[in-house]
Amino acid sequence: MTEWDDPEPEDSPDQATLAADLLGFTPASTPGREALAGGVQLGIVIVLLFVILPDRFSTETQWLILAGAVVYCATRVVSGIPKWRRHAERLRSAGNATGSLFGNGG
């Protein structure tokens, strides 16, 4: 066999990495990636506030910072819903999706 039978993978430069999803201010490309990014971000805040630096802030301040992080993540999700719906509509019109926002077939 002198050559590969598999087609070469297509590079997609517009796909973001998890690092870009974590550091960006805009929502991730899919709801699942946004949930992962939000979970990791909240986990980092929780570990920093309550495990690594528990004595740096008062308890009220810790909870306010955590609440701010939750509001930030919720804002990213809410702002991403129209983007994800448009993407689902494009896929549905192309005929290669079930039409569900979260891919559960309904």
Image (cartoon, rainbow, N blue to C red):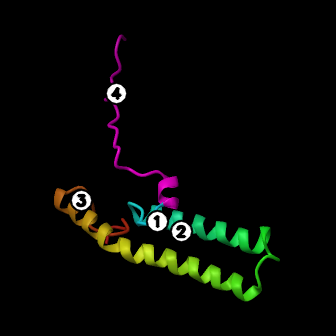
Between tags 4 and 3, which lies in front?
Answer: 3
Which amino acid does the dot numbered 3 rest on? Answer: Leu
Q: Which residue is drawn at 41% across and 66% down?
A: 27
Magenta span contains residue 42 = no
Query: Picture coordinates of residue 64 (x, y %)?
Result: 64, 85
Disc 2 and disc 1 in contact, CB within 8 angstroms: yes
Q: Which of marks 2 and 4 is in front?
A: 2
| Residue type (three-letter) at the residue carrying disc 4 | Asp
Which span of residues is magenta-colored? 1-23
Q: Residue 6 shows which numbered tag? A: 4
Sequence-wise first label, 2 or 4: 4
The secondary element bearing badge 1 is classed as helix
Q: Looking at the image, is mark 1 or mark 4 nearer the viewer?
A: 1
Query: Which label was assigned to residue 91?
Result: 3
**Disc 4 to disc 3, how far (Cα)?**
25 Å
Q: Residue 38 carries which label?
A: 2
Q: Is mark 2 on a helix, strand or loop?
A: helix
Q: What residue type is labelled 1?
A: Glu
Q: Which sits earlier in the primary sequence, circle 2 or circle 3?
A: 2
Q: Which residue lies furthest to the top in this view?
A: 2
First of labels 3, 1 by sequence position? 1
Q: Mark 1 points at which residue?
A: 34
Tag shown at residue 54:
none
Q: Where is residue 103 in the image (x, y as percent from the top left)?
A: 36, 65
Type of amino acid at the residue the image marks with label 2: Gly
Instruction: Identify the mark nearer the N-term, 4 or 3.
Output: 4
Q: Which residue lies furthest to the bottom in this view?
A: 60
Which mark is in front, 3 or 1? Answer: 1
Helix, strand or loop under label 4:
loop
Residue in view at x 63 percent, y 79 percent: 66
Residue 76, x across and y down, in percent: 44, 73
Q: Which of 88 and 20 is in front in this view?
A: 20
